[in-house]
Amino acid sequence: MVIGLVVASCGSTGSKNDSSAEGTIESANIEFAELIEHPQDFVGKNISVEGKVVHVCMMSGKKMFIVGDNPDIRLFITAGEDMPKFPTELLGSSIVVEGTLEKTGTASTEPEGGEGMHAAGAHAEAGTDSCETETALARQPVLSDLMMVYNRHTVK
Amino acid sequence: MNLSKFNRVTHRDIGYLIAGMTLIYAISGIALNHKHDWNPNYIIDNRSFKTDATIERESFSEKDAITLLETLDDKIEYKAFHFPDGSRLTIYIQGGVVQVNASTGDVLLQRITKRPLFYQVNFLHYNPGKWWKYFSDLYCVSLILVTITGLFIVKGRNGITRRGAVLTVIGIILPLIFLFIY
């Protein structure tokens, strides 16, 4: 079994350029700026938005943050139950991500309890503005109370 | 087949079937138990540098980022940059990130690689998908079966009625002690 897992490690768990959770449905393409301007218009809707990945949770891998032209406004993407995890290879990549925009706390998300963004301690989270990403998100004038429940993505 | 033999065969065969899963959960369990002491999924190689480059959020460009990277290591492949705030710059590179404090000139180069074996077992431990969830439910049921059938494998003085009973009770009391302590 151990040999099998080592062999599997030569593959790439969740490191594809294009990935998706199950149950993909039609989505509306919107600009990041449009989302910032009228976020409430898209709540509950399946949308696609392009952005740069500025943070990926390194523990469970279930959280990802993207930004558009404005580096101070992040969109929180949660993997949900059906997406294994976001690969850290996405850091810095421009992606088009598709999912459903929801109010924070209303979706079925993986609880992080002390992991991921909070896993500072001996190994501050690599990749970006680290564990402070969520704090920064909470301070944002917009999108702080929203999250996208991931459906699929494409690397640009 | 009598009940005793059925019990033994069930214990043996399910035990064989779940050996791999048990190792996956046991190895990842230890790794994740100590997640505050180490990163069980990734090996992060940190190297510190200093830069005297002038970095200003308003005027910083891709060219500036590449120039900065070249002073650290020729082999670094640039991806993108981002300012989390006014004084901190993150440059994304292939296989890692470079974090720069524009105020102090401190530069931290972090190379990130997956920790072999642990990355894979932890990935499975975290329930990567719906089907794995059902599969691991089945594993848990099998574990219960192996435990219950295991209690009745041996008869006599080492069986569940004597020595086995004492050890089983100890095994129940130990977690209860922790429950009372916490």
Image (spheres, rainbow, N blue to C red):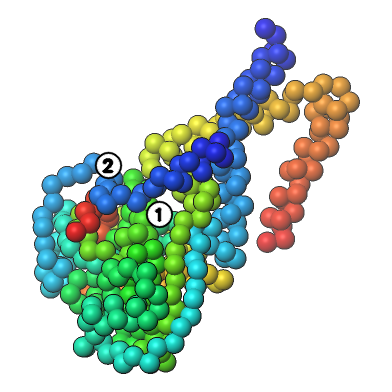
Q: Position of residue A109 (x, y in %)?
A: 36, 54
Q: Position of residue B100 (x, y in %)?
A: 38, 82
Mark number displayed over residue B140: none
Say if A29 sits above or below B155 in the image: below
Q: Is residue A19 left or right of residue A88?
A: left
In primary-sequence order, the first of circles 1 and 2 is 2
Image quarter in which the N terminus of chain A is found? top right
Q: Position of residue A20 (x, y in %)?
A: 26, 47
For the residues labelled 1 and 2, the Cα–Cα distance comes to: 16 Å
User: Residue placed at 57% from the left, 27% from the top?
Assistant: B17
Q: Position of residue B12 (x, y in %)?
A: 66, 22
Q: Chain of mark 2?
A: A
Q: Amino acid at mark 1?
A: Glu
Confirm or deny contact between disc 1 and disc 2 (CB under 8 A).
no
Q: Secondary structure at mark 1?
A: loop
User: Residue placed at 60% from the left, 47% from the top?
Assistant: B27
Q: Locate residue A95: give its quadrant.
A: bottom left
The mark closer to the camera, 1 or 2, is 2
Say if A120 sits above or below A62 in the image: below
User: Residue placed at 35% from the left, 64% from the top?
Assistant: B94
Q: Is residue A122 visible?
A: yes
Residue identifier under label 2: A22
Residue identifier under label 1: A110
Which residue occupies the foreground of this view, A120 or B161? A120
Q: Amino acid at mark 2?
A: Glu
